[in-house]
Image (cartoon, helix red, strand yellow):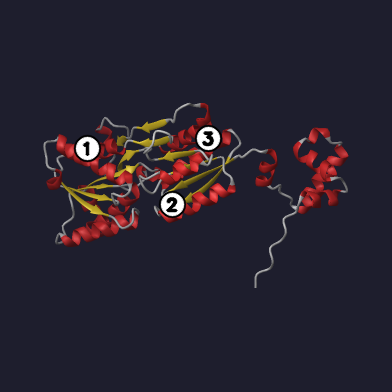
Amino acid sequence: MTSPARRRPSVADVARAAGVSVGSVSNVLNRPDTVLPETRERVEEAIRSLSFVRNGPARQLRRGTITTVGAIVLDIRNPFFTDVARGIEDRLALDDHTLMLASSDDDPERESKYLRMFEEHGVLGLLVVPTSSAHEHLVEIQERGVPVVLLDAPSSTTDMPSVSVDDVAGGTLAMAHLLSLGHHSVVFLNGPHTIRQCQARRTGVDRAVEAAGLAPDRVVDEVTLTTMDASGGDAALAAWIARHGGRAPDAVFCVNDLVAIGVQRRLRRHGGSELLARTAIVGYDDIDVAAELAQPLTSVRQPTHEMGYAAANVLLHGAERSDAEHIVFQPELVVRASTVQDPAASSTRP
């Protein structure tokens, strides 16, 4: 049986414990220099003994100021979004603002739930990695006076600011690299095209193949993942190998680094380090662990921290602009041993 929740100590409780007025407690909390030292000491002792923490939302309502920003990402377990969130947090901290974070799991209903909760809480604004390309529900939130900035997605309306990465360019970089190594048969482990980033990366892949004078349907074998994580990559490659009589692919492009880690794991289990060494693998995001793997991973780097920082900055300063700001970062290819055995010989950054 659970014990009843303990009532949160109030300012009045502190005042009674210290033998002073509520106004004196308020002065200690907000204007301590105006309070006599002995009074301040009694109030501070009462605060410590009661474990008093002031009610931030109530304080904001009284002052008419809001310092909390809400952010919804697809999956905070993915290190890509963890780094983005840190960029948001670092920017907000400069103005003494706080971050409330939620994962939509690419579920529109879950996204709607958190949007409603954040709006009811009274946030300063919202940073949203949207679950679809339709943004009408976010426009409605804007029209109710809550600023919205799209994150990791371009805006479908000129009135909504956005911060994104050119994923078409990222897909092109990855595929052009594999083609330059002589791979004309590539397995592309991708997420569903309902996710904008997945569709854009496929567009980039096709552009690279066509630029090389080849036909995408002959070069690219796209496999849609059930989950975009290491387990999903492992399972998808295992199924591909089974369909091809036990033969492993020569080259694999993965929609993100977690999927690529799963691919590496499956290759080791199937044919050991020798098979892993002769299979070219390209990931996407360049998460921190990509460079630390037993076989360091070639990956398309996204400026994750910079994206989060920029999105928070746009949100905080959007009111100062007469037009919505749209920032598009460019990705870069980072070549490592998973595609080039001697990456030091490459001109790209290690």
Note whether 49 is above or below 201 in the view shown. Answer: below
Quadrant in which the C terminus is drawn: top left
Residue 18 point in image, percent of width and height: 85, 48
Left or right of 289 on screen, residue 247: left
Residues at badges 3 and 2 in contact (C-beta under 8 Å)?
no
Q: CA distance from mark 1 to mark 2?
A: 29 Å
Return the disc, 3 or 2, that comes first in the chain's sequence: 2
The residue depicted at 39 percent of the width and 40 percent of the height is 152
The amino acid beneath tag 2 is Arg
Left or right of 158 on screen, residue 298: left
Residue 148 point in image, percent of width and height: 48, 39
Disc number placed over residue 199 in the picture, else none = none
SS under mark 3: helix
Return the disc, 1 or 3, that comes first in the chain's sequence: 3
* Quadrant position of residue 300: top left
SS under mark 1: helix
Return the disc, 1 or 2, that comes first in the chain's sequence: 2
Left or right of 201 on screen, residue 303: right
* Closer to viewer: mark 1 or mark 3: 3
**Residue at numbered disc 1:** 177
The amino acid beneath tag 3 is Arg
Residue 40 point in image, percent of width and height: 83, 40
